[in-house]
Amino acid sequence: MRKVAVSIVGLISLLSAQRIKGVFGLLEGNGSSYPNTGLYYRWEDENNASIMAYAGDLPGVEPFGNDLVYDPRSKLLFVVGGGPPLFTWNGSVHALDVWHSLVPLPTALTNIGARRLGVRDTLLLVTRDRAPYFTAYRINYDPQSGSLTLDSLWSPTHPLLRNLPDALLIWGDTAFIAITYNPTNFSADSLVLAINLQTRQVVGSWVVYPNPSELVRIKNNLYAACYGDFSSELRIARITPSVPTPQIQSAGYVSYGGFTTDTSGAKDTILFWAAVDGSLRAFDVNTGLTTSSPYLGLASSGAPFNPYAVLWVGNQIHMSFTNYIDTSLIVLRDPTYEPAPPHLDTLFVAGGFGGLGYPSLRRFIYVEDDTTRGLSTYLPAKPDFGGIQYDIRSGLLHWNPQVEIASAWVWDATGRLLRRESRPQSAIPLEDLPAGVYVFTAVTLDGQTLSHRFLKP
């Protein structure tokens, strides 16, 4: 049996990494106790079978964040902030040099109503909930100076570009977007459009079942998740770009989300959350049939924790569950790929056992990259936390009081979050924790990170 070690560290420990395979997740703040959007990050080092994960605030990024995308050329992570308030969608786009800092770069696209993001070469593609509904920006980034400019290039004009584009998928030189509903009266719409990024023209459109809100690709076809009014069965529309009419099939279950396929796009299977029992179901795109039992037996225990996001990365399934106050996260090793246990990689559970704290984890993305881009030439100075020590008499974990910390966390050796503190003043009380090994992580007000393992006798 292979033993999997788990450690929780800050992003600063990844700076010596070569090739990495990581997962990012966008955490929705609520505008009050969690005033910012947050970021979840997970990386597995296959060389030593260790897992590193992190969750924390993105200072300055509005709560109710909606989407994120990674640009492998500039090595920047772009995220969409939402409100506040909840129903006033600012939709600002922020950029992070995520391998060095959690503080967004000064350049931002503020209050543009952004919904979904995509990247193609040096282009940042943005869909919006207001005109222009689709815009391409040129990404110009100098990592030595940290300067970023986003030059608005073009927005196609077409009578079908309207309402609320709520899904975006890039395939070669074509951007596919799904038009869901009119944000002024919430009437249903049912279009998937194709925009050629070279000619800047709408080159195709398909009428599908109402409310297409997710797009995935398997081999030579696209599949749109069409939710209707969320009271009827999920419809899955198969779109072949060369065929004007899509094939629309019923998945057999009402669904509220979680529509995904393996990131490689090789498997003929789509996973989605079934509303009837909170189970993860598998839809075969060849037969048009959904499995009669939950995939791998995976199902939510029900209210108050409901399934929310899911990502399928080869041999791993990342799942988030929410009660809209806290989020549970489970990363499962798919036994169909690796039959030998253990199958549970990482577990952040809520309901009295930790959790991520944020109201929900909305969206995952998968990233493979090389992070060795001249790091030593512009790596920010590591903050001087001084001697971090646990005082047995006071039950406090102390550090340099001159360091201003934005957020701090204490995790146990299995990856469970035990403490979360906002703006702690040089110490965290830990007298109620049992003896053992713990990990303290912190983010300073200027976005620098620290991870420190300590023993409580």
Image (cartoon, grey):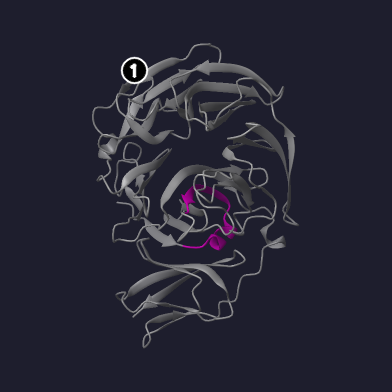
Q: Residue at x 65, y 47 (%)?
A: 110
Q: Which residue is drawn at 59% across and 40% down?
A: 114
Magenta region includes residue 28: yes
Q: Is residue 41 shown above or below 278?
A: below
Count of labels in the image: 1
Q: Magenta residues, as a range?
A: 9-29
Task: Tell me, yes or no, if residue 219 can be seen here.
Answer: no
The image quadrant of residue 156 is top right
Query: 232 and 415: which one is in front?
Result: 232
Q: Which residue is drawn at 63% across and 54% down?
A: 97
143 sits left or right of 179 in the view = right
Query: 73 and 426: which one is in front?
Result: 426
Residue 37 point in image, percent of width and height: 52, 53
Q: Is residue 133 shown above or below 7?
A: above
The image quadrant of residue 416 is bottom left
Query: 418 and 450: which one is in front?
Result: 418
408 sits left or right of 122 in the view = left
Task: Tell me if mark 1 has few (under 14), some (14-19) or many (20+) residues whose alpha carbon lies within 10 angstroms of its own.
Answer: few
Q: Residue at x 42, y 75 (%)?
A: 454
Q: In which quarter of the image is the C terminus?
A: bottom left
Residue 395 point in image, percent of width and height: 37, 82
Residue 225 point in image, percent of width and height: 43, 27
Q: What residue type is labelled 1?
A: Thr
Q: Name the residue under label 1.
A: 287
Q: Is residue 213 shown above or below 441?
A: above
For mark 1, give the secondary structure. Answer: loop
The image quadrant of residue 337 is top left
Please, which residue is most extreme toward the front here?
Answer: 185
Task: Tell me, yes or no, if residue 203 can be seen here.
Answer: yes
Q: Is residue 253 shown above or below 22?
A: above
Residue 264 point in image, percent of width and height: 48, 33
Magenta region includes residue 38: no
